[in-house]
Amino acid sequence: MAATVHDVAAIAGVSIKTVSNVVNNFPNIRPATRAKVQAAIAELGYQPNLAARSLRSGRTGTIGLALPELSLPYFAELADAVIRAAERRGLVVLIEQTNGDRSRELAMLNSPRLKLTDGLLFSPLGMTDDDAATLNVTYPLVLLGERILTGPTDHVSMRNEQAAHAATAHLIECGRRRIAVIGARDGAVIGSAGLRLRGYRSALEEADIRFDPDLVVLAQLWNRGNGAAGMRELLARGVPFDALFGLNDTLTLGALRVLQEHDLKVPDDVAVIGFDNIDEAQFSLPSLSTIDPGRPEIAEIAVQLLADRIAGAAGPTEPRELLAQFQLIRRESTAVRDTVTASS
């Protein structure tokens, strides 16, 4: 027989009301109590009656997640992290793909399918700060990413500029002075590309290294093909470089392939670092040094903010902006090799 709320309460040693409060993600529950109930739910495989819960509470127990492109590893892994964070709160995730198209993103904000959800996690790529007013919606909404920085809603992001500074500084610490970049976008100020390029430039300035625009390669879409094309363009320019900062791992892995095709050794000839710490980065050859932007933390914070808004427990109505912590991951692509002197 299927486990019931009574079974969960008995295992956890709490009241049925407490189990209901945990399942419905009500606030003001002690963390230890919430953990006991969640452990009992997991042990028994308890599944709430969503239809009955919806009738009682007016909620569906489902949240939306709108992402640009699930074929890109970063967004696929972010979706996985969001699903896991939502499951811990008894929530189901409905995923929508916008392809980073502004018109589709705007349509998403008014989609009839949102009636199936209690709120939306939204990561726009085509929209900008000029579209911030469209985020004044009547349902709970949490924004992800860096395309809109002045919106009227809760916002969870990563420390793009500081992390890019750390990635570039790491290459400089490895003794590199001619550091190329792949993934810049012409005229970009906001968004990941603009912020990461700013961090790159600030690290160069801090090390008293002159910025050389010939070392910067544009890429509108951050995929492997454009990373490979960007590296071919850089090599065709004939400018000397001894390091590469790819503005995301997917670009960087494409560039890494072209370096190997041209018999350039990594890290001996060119030290390489990416950004995002996608799963594939640790299995490339050589393994890719990168920035871990705190993807699980981003998912956890975003889901909790949305759950708070859904429960009406957010406190102040002013929008909240939270930044995840990042970590520099050192791997083989930037390893400093010891100099070995042959004996005579």
Image: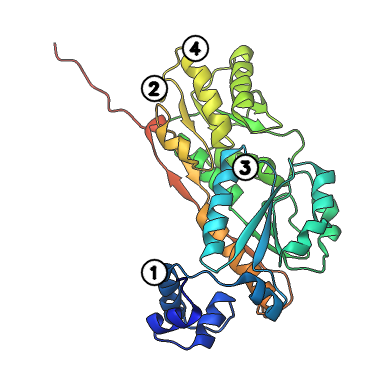
Task: Say if mark 2 contacts mark 3, CB within 8 Å.
Answer: no
Q: Secondary structure at mark 1?
A: helix
The earlier-in-sequence mark between 3 and 1 is 1
For marks 3 and 4, give the one nearer the viewer.
Answer: 4
Question: Depth check: 32 or 212 in front?
Answer: 32
Is residue 298 something that shows in the picture?
A: no
Q: CA distance from mark 1 to mark 2?
A: 51 Å
- Residue at 47% x, 78% y is 34
Disc 2 marks which residue? 268
Q: Quadrant of residue 53?
A: bottom right
Distance of label 2 from label 4 (alpha carbons): 14 Å
Q: Residues within 10 Å of mark 4 (few under 14, many from 20)?
A: few
Q: Is residue 107 above or below residue 332?
A: below
SS under mark 4 = loop
From the viewer's perspective, tell me whether residue 32 is left or right of residue 117: left
On the question of residue 93 being in view, the answer is: yes
Q: Circle 4 sits on which residue?
A: 262
Q: CA distance from mark 2 to mark 3?
A: 25 Å
Q: Amino acid at mark 2?
A: Asp
Label 3 – label 4 distance at C-alpha: 27 Å
Task: Work out whether residue 166 or residue 80 is closer to the camera in this orientation and state it.
Answer: 80
| In the image: residue 306, left or right of residue 187 | left
| Residue 43, disc | 1
Q: Earlier in the sequence, mark 2 or mark 3?
A: 3
**Residue 267 image position (x, y, % from top left):** 41, 25
Are the two marked residues, 3 and 1, in contact with CB atoms closer than 8 angstroms? no
In front: mark 3 or mark 1?
1
Q: Of the two numbered discs 1 and 2 on the same chain, state the one appearing first in sequence.
A: 1
Question: Which label lies toward us, 1 or 4?
Answer: 1
Q: Nearer the viewer, mark 1 or mark 2?
A: 1
